[in-house]
Structures are given as structure tokens and as C-alpha cells.
């Protein structure tokens, strides 16, 4: 129930949430750390990512593995950095 007394439609909310980010919600609920890394590229140059999941309260291990993968694949050098200052209002 909302503060104004209106009923909260959990099913509608969950449907929208799962539609937007279907692979993250469960880890938000369980408190497990998760990382998404764009390690690969399609033939067309689009990023292809993987999602890593860690044990609860072991964020440091997940971050270490993520850093190791980032350095081993050098994915940060494959993409042109886009800065907001390059866009005109």
C-alpha cells in the first residue's frame, strides 16, 4: 500500500522490472554481488557481455575477478570513450 492509501500492484511492477533487467532482480533481492562485463564484440562491433555473480558478502572477490578479466581481455581499449561534453544541447 502506498502512503496515500492506494494499493501497490506488485505484479505490474515486477513485470516492468523483469522486462527491463531480467537477470539482475534476483541478486538484488538476495544481496549477492553481481557484475556485468562487456568482454566480447559481435562481428558488427556491438558489445557482448557476461554477468558474474558472487557469494553474499564477498564483493571483494567478484571485483578482483572482474578486474582480472578486464585486464586480460583489454576490453576498455576496444571502445571509443564518449564524453558528455561532445554532445550539443
Image (tube, helix red, strand yellow):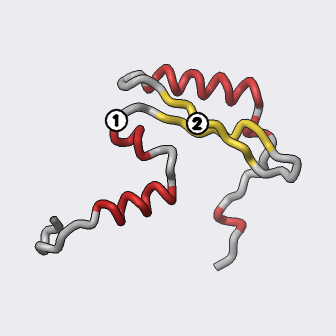
Q: Determine which quarter of the picture holds residue 27.
A: top left
The picture places residue 25, in percent across and down from the top left corner, at 42, 46
Q: Quick one: 63 or 8, which is closer to the camera?
A: 8
Q: Quick one: 70 or 4, which is closer to the camera?
A: 4
> Residue at position x 67%, y 26% from top?
69
Q: Quick one: 76 or 10, which is closer to the camera?
A: 10
Q: Residue furthest bottom?
A: 89
Q: Provide the residue designation for mark 1.
A: 30
What secondary structure is marked by label 1? helix
> Residue at position x 47%, y 44% from top?
24
C-alpha distance separating marks 2 and 1: 16 Å
The picture places residue 56, in percent across and down from the top left corner, at 37, 25
Horizontal arrangement in the rendering, residue 2 relative to residue 48 (left or right): left
What secondary structure is marked by label 2? strand
Mark drawn on residue 79: none
> Residue at position x 56%, y 31% from top?
52
Q: Provide the residue designation for mark 2.
A: 51
Amino acid at each position: 500500500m502506498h502512503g496515500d492509501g492506494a494499493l501497490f500492484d506488485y505484479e505490474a511492477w515486477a513485470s516492468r522490472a523483469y522486462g527491463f533487467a531480467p537477470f539482475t532482480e534476483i541478486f538484488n533481492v538476495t544481496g549477492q554481488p553481481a557484475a556485468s562485463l562487456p568482454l566480447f564484440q559481435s562481428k558488427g562491433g556491438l558489445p557482448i557481455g557476461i554477468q558474474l555473480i558472487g557469494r553474499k558478502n564477498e564483493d571483494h572477490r567478484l571485483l578482483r575477478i572482474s578486474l582480472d578479466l578486464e585486464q586480460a581481455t583489454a576490453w576498455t581499449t576496444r571502445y571509443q570513450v564518449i564524453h558528455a561534453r561532445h554532445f550539443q544541447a
